[in-house]
Structure formats: structure tokens, C-alpha cells
Amino acid sequence: MELTPVQIRILGCLVEKQTTTPDNYPLTTNALVAACNQTSDRDPVVGYDERTVDAAMLELRTQGLARTVTGGRANKHRHVLDEAWQLSASELAVLAVLFLRGPQTTGELRQRCERMHPFDDLHQVESVLEALAARAEPFVVQLQRVPGQKERRWAHLLGEEPAGVAVVPEAVEPRAVAERRAQPDSDLAADLAAEVARLRVDVDRLYELLGESPPEAG
């Protein structure tokens, strides 16, 4: 399933507010818009209007991922991800933080899930991530570490790839190295001997240009 960025932000907000502000949940459209657009605990920061949120909510209801309670002064919205995707509270919390803040390390996820679902240690977070990654249709993936990062990050797989985020492929050996590894030992030894001979010729030329004599081979 591929969700739009607006749908992902809405679902993340609904899960978050269900546990952090239960007295105000389900959310009115105004409250949902404010939750989507808040500047703290969000990456990226967005500026959705009511029409954008209402249109995305309609799509989420059609997909069976959210519901709207009508009646009273205003309609109120809630998610049903636990029913639709058979998610536990811990899995919901981890997904919500990934929805709201993009790819993160295990340590960041543990810290940022604290208000929704506290984890005793990193192993618990890793267990949840591994369970989400092991589904028939994986919900998360661990990204390859890129230069400048000390730890690998996790990203959700339920929407469009965030800007600037890509799964870095494993390093590939240069073709010459790979070909050399595939050669028989006898051929490899012959190639190495030829390389050494070429290097000796180059070194002799350098000494000749410098007007010096090469040292005697020991």
C-alpha cells in the first residue's frame, strides 16, 4: 500500500494524539489540521488547509484506515490502523513516529516513542522493527549507513520515498577486482608477475630521467 504524504501525516497525528491527548480524541478537523501543521516533532513542517485534510480523510475512510464520527458541533476523526493492519500498541507508536519524523535510528525511535509507548531498552524497539519488517508486505526497512552517520536508520515503506532518502546498495567490487578474484591461482600469479615487471620498467625510466642509477636488486 502506498499512501500520500498528507495521508501519512494524518495517520501519524491521529495515532499520536490518541495516546498523548486522549481527552481531545477523536480530533475535530480544526484540531487535526493543527496537529498536522505543528512545528514541533514534525519533519518536514507542513502547512495544510482544511480542504487538503478533508480530501485525504475521505481517501483514508475509503481505504478502511480511518473513520469520521458525525453529529454534534463538528465531525471528529480517528484512525483504525490497529484493526485494519492488526498492529499492537508498540507497533503503532513506532510507525507513528516514522510517519511524523521520517527515517530514524533505533535510539531516536525509543526516545520519541516515550509519550506514546515507553520502551524499556533498545532491544524492545528492535524487536518491534524486525516484526514490522518481517511481514508478508514489509512496513519498514533498515537503510544502509551513509557517510556522516554513525548508525543505520529505519524508514517506513507505506508511502512515497521522502526527498533525499534512498536505500544505499551494498558496495560492489570494481570489475577488475572481481575478475581477478575469479581467475585461477596460476593465471593470477602470472598477471601479478607481469604487473611487477611493468612497474620495474617504469621505475628504471624514472631513475634515468633523474640521472641516477637504480639500486641493485637485493
Image (cartoon, rainbow, N blue to C red):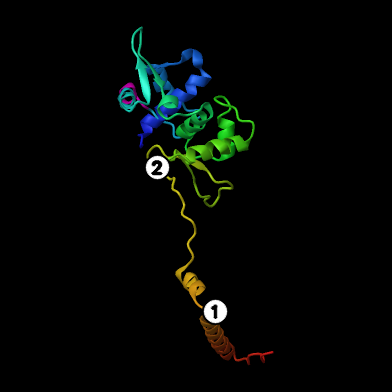
The residue segment tinted magenta is 48-53
* 41 with respect to 60 (left or right): right
Which residue carries the number 2 mark? Answer: 161
Asked whether, in this view, residue 168 is left or right of residue 121, the answer is: left
The residue mark sitting in front, 2 or 1, is 1
Drawn side of residue 99 relative to residue 48, left or right: right
Q: Position of residue 156 (x, y in %)?
A: 45, 38
Which image quadrant: the C terminus?
bottom right
Q: Do residues under tags 2 and 1 come within 8 Å of each other at their CB atoms? A: no
**Is residue 61 within the magenta segment?**
no
| Identity of the residue furthest to the top in this view | 72
In the image, is residue 49 part of the stretch drawn in magenta? yes
At x 48%, y 21%, the residue is: 17
Q: Is 69 placed above or below 54 here?
A: above
Please name the predominant secondary structure of the magenta segment in the image: helix
Query: What residue sits right under mark 1 in the picture?
Result: 185
Instruction: Tell me residue 202's x, y (percent).
Output: 54, 86
Q: Secondary structure at mark 2?
A: loop
Observer-nearest of 203 and 218 = 218
